[in-house]
Image (tube, grey):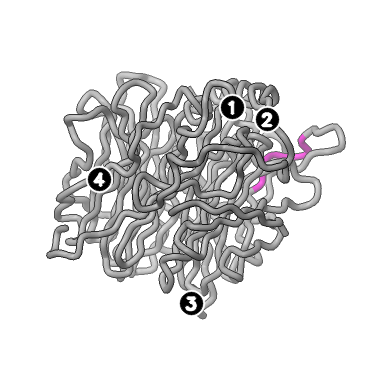
Amino acid sequence: MGTGTRSTSRSSWPPVLMAVGLLVLGVAGLRLFGGDDGGAASAVDEGPLADCDVGGCKANADVRPARGYEVPSVVVDPGDPDHLVVADVNLVGGLCGWHVTFDGGEEWEDGVFELPTGFKNCQLDSAGFLSAGNIARGPSGTLYYVFSSARVDEAKTPLEGESVLVARSSDGGRSFAAATVAVPGGSTEVSYVRPSVNVVAGADGTDRVLVSFWGCDLVACARAHFAQSLDGGASFSPPVLVSVDDPGGTSPSAPVVDADATVHVMFVRHSDNPSVDSQLALARSTDGGASFTNTTIDSQPFLGRTYDAAELATSPDASILYTVFSDNRQGRPDVFFRRSSDGGDTWDQAVLLNSLSEGGAFLPNVSVGPGGRIDVAFYQQTRENVNDVVWTHSNDGGDTFPRSLQLNDAFIDRDVGYSFEVGDSYGPGVASAPAAAFVVWSDSRLGNGLTDTQDTVLRRAPVPATGPGT
């Protein structure tokens, strides 16, 4: 199991990313303040990221200047909103890990996921993607984190393509058991990368763990897949093709299950012809995930930011589907929300969620609280290579999103840190609690041109206690 450290604060396509990934690895190797996972503490001014309620707090215990946390996700204990677990990957060293707090962000403990024997680190896969996935909490309270990695020999040569791995915690994130192989990679020409996980109640009360991921070969990552565990993550089904219609598809959302027991996965089809619109597609399985059919939901100019297309969620009773995504229908990336009340057969008109007075918006994520509040977080670009983090919410099932809030109290310069270098394609994470939304994002405000320090930052966004629609 990973060991923890603690700190205190005051409250196109794969070849392109492969080249970028090699650049990141090279730059990381030149850091003056590098070290292994347990390096000595260094004096760092954490003042700008010290308040989880105002501007955000640094969500890790790492004080070494050379750190580069990216691909953040978060879960909150529904019975204790001060208990949060964040997962991400540190690009300096290529280690997937977690950070847990039991006091709302005052103190954090860090850990690193232990890989199975023979597997390489958790940084960049053979397609040039970051290997980190996301963290999810099951109805049992067990935490699940998915990521991809490959077995290598003593010469660090891959013995097979990337596998999907899963790590589990039964003690609220204090520790995680060593990761196990959920979906094994095939020959070196078959890799399974960029997994996403969702967990729902199984038929016998056991956690049902649903995983989506990309299938890659030597040419491209042009297929979306699904696998599941009906025994709480102990074993998984073989991969099932989700994007069954030509020309395939990528960027699968985490799977969801509706009230009719249909499994849904959203994905995107991009065309090599720039004059042909991208397609937002929905895959549905009415046989428990054994097979899928595809339906096109929307066609717009360039869906998604680089590779991320859409995220899916359901209402608390699973009778309504929600999706958020970005596209360029207005000549720039904007974030939209759509809703289906009939299992994905028809969808309401797209609702714009970002402000037109600012720059483009992209990489949205969505979470639904037990009371039905819909929380959406995304990046908004105020000027070139500068991001803000925006949260908006709906208390009326998506009829209205009456206000939005910028969560960071100072702009995030993407020329510092690693986000821009790895494709700027990993958005904020969001988790809903009864009275607040918790949003995490990658933030480089403690870095500079020498260190490129980048942290995962957590912000608590309280929900106004007023009438419907707020």
Q: Which residues are magenta?
A: 158-163
CA distance separating discs 2 and 1: 7 Å
Residue occupied by mark 1 = 451
Residue 167, x across and y down, in percent: 63, 58
Q: Residues within 10 Å of mark 3 (few under 14, many from 20)?
A: few
- The first of marks 3 and 1 along the sequence is 3
Magenta stretch secondary structure, dominant: loop
Q: Mark 2 or mark 4, which is nearer to you?
A: 2
Residue occupied by mark 4 = 405
Residue at screen point 64% across, 56% down: 182
- The first of marks 3 and 4 along the sequence is 3
Q: Nearer the viewer, residue 242 or 191?
A: 191
Residue occupied by mark 3 = 203
Position of 120 with respect to 221 (left or right) is right
Q: Nearer the viewer, residue 350 or 341?
A: 350
- The first of marks 1 and 4 along the sequence is 4
Residue 316, x across and y down, in percent: 31, 68
Residue occupied by mark 2 = 33
Do the residues under discs 2 and 1 have CB atoms within 8 angstroms? Answer: yes
